Amino acid sequence: MPKQTFFNLPENKRKTLIEAAEQEFARVPPFEASIANIIKAAGIPRGSFYQYFEDKEDLFSFLLDEKLKERKVYFITLLKKHNGDIVSALMETYHNFLVELPDEEERNFLKNAMLYASNRIENSFSDMFDAEQDKRYFNDIKELIDTSNLNVKDEKDLILIIQIISAVAFHNFVEKSIKKLSDHEAMELFITKMNLIKQGIYKQ
């Protein structure tokens, strides 16, 4: 997390630093990112950077968490739209990310995060649906999910289902990038995986 000195900055200076960091992390993966490029674009001394953040990974984690907060709000909107159907909501979320996300810089930022995630960064993605990490958010989506068609006995089962389908989405995107699949191919693959989860892999 940023140090308090970062939050004490005037809004325009915080915004300039964030924009400089987003450009750098969209350009290259986190481990290749250059603090020198960030501070040059932001117009601040190197010493000031370390007054705001521990290191570049600390800054990247903060930016990622902020973007995931936006994704959380969007996911809740889609849960309402699909009347609590969690799989349909996640498929539209995935489609939006693949096809409709208009900001190329944000798309590259998230792509670099997923492909080159350290444990610290990967935890930011998994925490998105972690009941222990964000109890209020989990309660919000739990109230919206239609469990009538889900094979769940209790909240623990629901948490596992959410973790499973979100993990499939995460790794499907990684697979898309590694295998250089088109958006259409990646979406078709994701739909197939989601249908297998919905139907089960054993014949009934």
Image (cartoon, grey):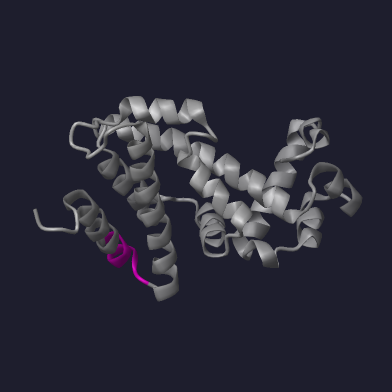
Which secondary structure dominates the residues rendered in magenta? helix
- The answer to whether residue 165 is seen in the rendering is yes
- For residue 125, side relative to residue 25 (left or right): left
Is 186 contained in the magenta span?
yes
Q: Is residue 144 above or below residue 23?
A: above
Q: Is residue 103 above or below residue 34?
A: above
| Percent of width and height locating residue 98 | 38, 56
In the foreground, 13 or 188:
188
In the foreground, 77 or 199:
199
| Percent of width and height locating residue 112 | 56, 61
Q: Name the quarter where the N terminus is drawn.
A: top right
**Quadrant of the rendered image containing residue 193:** bottom left
| Percent of width and height locating residue 176 | 39, 67
- The answer to whether residue 20 is seen in the rendering is no
Is 83 contained in the magenta span?
no
Look at the image and give the residue range highlighted in magenta. Answer: 181-187
**Quadrant of the rendered image containing residue 77:** top left
Q: Residue at x 38, y 39 (%)?
A: 159
- For residue 119, side relative to residue 16 (left or right): left
- For residue 119, side relative to residue 49 (left or right): left
Q: Is residue 40 above or below residue 7?
A: below
| Percent of width and height locating residue 20 | 71, 52
In the foreground, 114 or 150:
150
